[in-house]
Image (tube, rainbow, N blue to C red):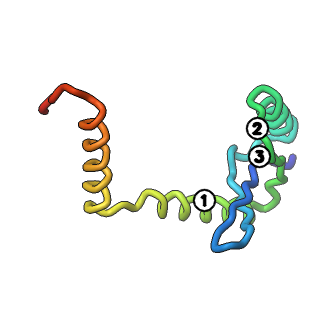
């Protein structure tokens, strides 16, 4: 019995080029469950660009998951200085918007 997984493809502009980015949304399951889930997400949640893909021997699936993990890790790597800057900006916005001084 073949396994199938659901993915979504986003097209982004990076450095002036169109770059398709495929993101895996589900673990491999049987075909009927994958197609039903994709149908529900397309209709109930109005998601676009969903695709049901065959798992095969898993090499493509593992490659996509690896790329996805690298993108997520890269997006989350913040230095302490960046975090301090973000907190400072948030405090300025909160301080400018509210009239009360709450100290913690």
Q: What number is the disc on residue 47?
A: 2
The span from disc 1 to disc 3 (Cα, nearest Å) is 14 Å
The span from disc 2 to disc 1 (Cα, nearest Å) is 19 Å
**Residue at x-position 82% and y-position 40%:** 30
Q: 101 or 18, which lies in front? A: 101
Of circles 2 and 3, which is in front? 2
The span from disc 2 to disc 3 (Cα, nearest Å) is 12 Å
Could you tell me residue 19's position as x and y percent?
72, 67
Query: Against 71, is 35 above or below?
Result: above
Q: Which residue is mark 1?
A: 68
Q: Which residue is mark 3?
A: 6
**Residue at x-position 60% and y-position 64%:** 66
Whether tag 2 and tag 1 are in contact, CB under 8 A, the answer is no
Q: What number is the disc on residue 7?
A: none
Mark 3 packing: few (<14 Cα in 10 Å), some, or many (20+)? Answer: many
Q: Quadrant of the C terminus?
A: top left
Element class at badge 1: helix
Mark 2 packing: few (<14 Cα in 10 Å), some, or many (20+)? Answer: few
Residue that extends furthest to the left in the rendered view of this protein: 103
**First in sequence: mark 2 vs mark 3:** 3
């Amino acid at each position: 019995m073949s396994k199938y997984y659901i993915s979504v493809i986003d097209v982004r502009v990076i450095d002036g080029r169109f770059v398709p980015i495929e993101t895996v949304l589900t673990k491999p399951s049987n075909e009927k469950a994958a197609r039903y889930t994709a149908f529900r997400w397309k209709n109930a949640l109005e998601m676009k660009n969903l695709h049901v893909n065959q798992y095969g021997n898993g090499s493509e699936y593992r490659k996509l998951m690896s790329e996805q993990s690298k993108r997520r890790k890269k997006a989350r790597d913040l230095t302490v200085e960046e975090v301090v800057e973000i907190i400072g900006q948030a405090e300025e916005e909160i301080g400018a918007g509210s009239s009360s001084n709450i100290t913690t």
